[in-house]
Image: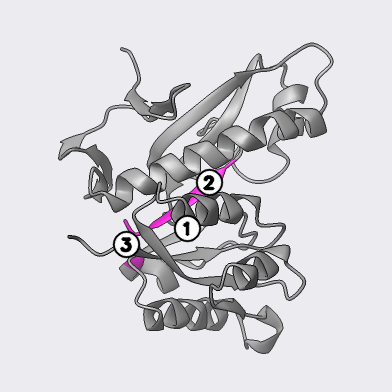
Amino acid sequence: MKAPMRVVVLASGRGSNLQALIDAQRDGRLPIRIVGVLSDKPSARALELAAAAGIPAFVCDPREATDRLAYDRSLFARIEALEAELVVLAGFMRILDPRAFAPWLGRIINIHPSLLPLYPGLHTHRRALEAGETRHGASVHFVTADLDGGPVIAQVGIDILAGDTAQNLADRLLPLEHRLLVRSVGMIASGRLCWSSGVVCLDSRALNSPLVLEADDSLAIRPE
C-alpha cells in the first residue's frame, strides 16, 4: 500500500482551509499526512489548530530574516527538512520569491477566492461586486512566479445575488472553498492529478480547462 503523501501547509490566518484538510485526513477521506504547518504570523489561529491536531507547528517570523529571499529560502529549507511531497498555501499572505521555490514547481498549490484568471491578488469579493459580475468562485492552482497566475487545477462557482456584500459573498463561498481544496489535494495525493511541463494533467492527459467541483464533491471535466 502506498504511504500517505506528506503535506506541509502554509497559513497566515484563521486556518479554516487547514482545518478542512485536517478533518478530511482524520476521517480517512484524504490519503495524506500533514507533517507540518508553517506560519509567518505568531498569532495565526492556524498554529493553534495544528497543535490541537498533534501536527508540528512552526512560526517563521520574517522579522528574523535579513531580506525576503533569505526568508523564503529558510522557509523552504524547513519544508525540505520535513520531507514534504506537496506544499499547500492555505491563506498564506506572503508573495514567495520564485528563486526560493523553483525546485518545488509542480509541488506547490494555492487556494484563491476568485475564478482565475479574474481578480488575482487581494479583495477579490469586493472587486467582483464592483465589476458587476454575476458569478464568483474559488480556484486551486499550481504556484508559479506569476501572482495567482499558475495553471488552474479546479474551480467552483456561485451566483452573485442581489444585495450581496463582500462579506456575505465570502461567507457563502468559504464552505465550497474547503470542499474544492480537499478534493483537489485528494486527487493529487492519489496520483490522478499532476503537473507536467507546466500543464495540469488528469490521468496522464493534459487538461484544456480547469476541473469543476460538482455537488457530490467530484471534480469533473468542464463541458466544451
Q: Residues within 10 Å of mark 2 (few under 14, many from 20)?
A: many
x, y (%) of residue 83? Answer: 34, 77
Separation of marks 1 and 2 at Cα, in angstroms:
8 Å
Q: Quadrant of residue 39?
A: bottom right
Whether residue 114 is visible to the viewer of this picture, yes or no, is: no
At numbered mark 2, what does the secondary structure look like: helix, strand or loop?
A: strand
User: Which residue matches tag 2?
Assistant: 111
Q: Which residues are magenta?
A: 104-112
Q: Residues within 10 Å of mark 3 (few under 14, many from 20)?
A: many
Query: Which one is nearer the viewer's eye here, 146 or 82?
Result: 82
Counting residues from the start of the chain, the first of labels 1 and 2 encountered is: 1
Q: Quadrant of the N terminus?
A: bottom left
How many callouts does the rendering have? Answer: 3
Q: Is residue 218 left or right of residue 15?
A: left
x, y (%) of residue 63? Answer: 71, 83
Query: Which one is nearer the viewer's eye here, 153 or 203?
Result: 203
Q: Amino acid at mark 1?
A: Val
Q: Amino acid at mark 2?
A: Ile
Counting residues from the start of the chain, the first of labels 1 and 3 encountered is: 3
Q: Quadrant of residue 123?
A: top right
Residue 99 position (above or below residue 117) = below
At numbered mark 3, what does the secondary structure look like: helix, strand or loop?
A: strand
Circle nearer the viewer, 3 or 2: 3
Q: Amino acid at mark 3?
A: Met
At numbered mark 1, what does the secondary structure look like: helix, strand or loop?
A: strand
Q: Is residue 220 left or right of residue 168?
A: left
User: Which residue matches tag 1?
Assistant: 88
Query: At 34% across and 54% down in the image, what residue appears?
Result: 31
x, y (%) of residue 4? Answer: 30, 62
Query: At 74% across and 28% down in the image, what residue appears?
Result: 169
